[in-house]
Structure formats: structure tokens, C-alpha cells
Image (cartoon, rainbow, N blue to C red):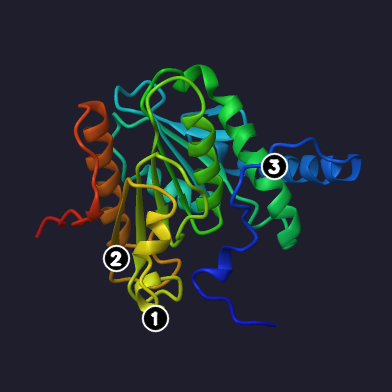
Amino acid sequence: MRKHDVYTRWDYIREEISLDALSREDQARFDLICTNIMRQRERVAKFAHTQCGDMLVWNPDGPLPPLCWCFNDWSEAMLFSRKLSPQQPFFASLSMHANTADWLAKTRFNDLLAKRYLDSMEDIIADKPVLVGGNCQGAPIAESMVQQLAGRRGPMPFLITLEYIGRRSGEWPRLMLFGKQSRFNPFDNGHDPLPYWQERGKHFAWATLSVGHGQYFKEPNIDVLARVVAQMSGRLSRSEPLPQGPFELPALAG
């Protein structure tokens, strides 16, 4: 088995979106994955304020632009919800990380799962600026959500990803965060990632945190991430310029 680097790790993600109809067998597999996600959601639903389709929701009536985040585990969503402003509408969804180890299935189903999440909240986010985020295997789903939103009417969405170099090309703005000690840090891979990103869009920014892979939702990193969301949400709500190039992470209070 070959050793994956920050680029080959994501080869299973198509560079073009695919929403083609599934075969009967694949449809049954996709439905089973969605059913398992909903069952897992039900175990923790009491900790959220409400539900929206397959998603858990906190602060649904908050005045800030909605934040839609795709996690690998519902525990990450619950931890993050405690760090966000009560004015921040927060819609949490789940990747297929815990529901299938079949990478070909993820290739076929990622875009359809993203569409399913978007369709469940279409009336809520219509004509609103939206923040969309995702970590690890949730990041490609978030990317697909942004790509699909960018093709609809309304303001251009803003994408935040953790540990994901991005596979899709588009004009949506994006902020990519990486752990300095992570094996998915493209700046520690011997190749300059800027040409790769420039081929896929003009509007991108990046930053690194002093963490390893999978450490974003632990203290104090989760506080930094919550401040990044607050800053980006505020910029979107005020129609201010979004970051471009190296991004300076917000400092924590001393």
C-alpha cells in the first residue's frame, strides 16, 4: 500500500461535481449510510436546540450568517457549539467517516450527501451569505456544498476547511487551516502548494496552527477556531473583504 501525502490523500475526491443518479445497489448503500447518520444524530439530538433534516441546529434564530459545518463525529459538533456566539446560527452535519471505509463509495456519495444537507435547509439559507466549513473527511463535503451553493442564486458562500488542500476549482473564497505538526500540512511536504491553489481559484487564504492532525476541537485550539468563525461571520454580515493570502489567526486573551 502506498503512503499517502497531502495530495494523494484526497485522490478519491473527483475534481468535477457528480450528482448522477445511482444504481439500485448504490442507492441502497447510500440510503443505509444516511439512515446510520440519522440514528447517530438521534443519540445526541437532545443537546441541540432543534433539528433540520439530517442536521443538528443551535441558535437557529441568530442574526449572523448561518454556519454549516460537516464533522467526522457528533461530539465535535457539541464541543464547537459551546464555543460559538449565541447569535451564530449553527447547522452541524456528519461525514461518512464512521459509516463506511469504502473509499469508492465516498467518491460516489460525497456530492449527493452534500446536496442532501443543502436541500434540507434550502429555505433557511436562501439569499443569505453562508459560512460553510468542514474538517478532514467533512471538508470535501463542505467544498461540494459551497460549489453547489455557488451555482444557485444568492451571495457567494465562504468556505473554511481544516486539513484539506481542496480539489475543486471555483471563484468562492476559501480559508484553509492546517496543523503545523500534521502529516496533512502542505507546507511541510517539500512542494509549494501555491501553484496548486492558484490553478483552482483566485480567492484563497491559509494559516497554520501549532497542532497535530485531529486536535482542532481540543483546548485551546477550539477557541482559536471559534474566533476565526466569529471574525469571518462578522465580515460576511458587514460585507467586508474576506482574507486573501497568509491569514493571521486571532489571538486568544492573555
Which residue lies under the disc numbered 2? 208
Q: Is residue 100 left or right of residue 192?
A: right
Which residue lies under the disc numbered 1? 190
Q: Nearer the viewer, mark 3 or mark 1?
A: 1
The N terminus: image quadrant: bottom right
**Secondary element at image label 1:** loop
Name the residue at 51% across, 49% down.
168
Which residue lies under the disc numbered 3? 39
**Residue 11: where, in percent of width, then height?**
61, 63
The three-letter code of the residue at mark 1 reads: Gly
The three-letter code of the residue at mark 2 reads: Thr
**Residue 64: where, in percent of width, then height?**
30, 27
Considering only vertical position in the picture, is 64 above or below 243? above
Closest to the observer, 85 or 167? 167
Q: How many marks?
A: 3
Considering only vertical position in the picture, is 90 above or below 227? above
Q: Nearer the viewer, mark 2 or mark 1?
A: 1
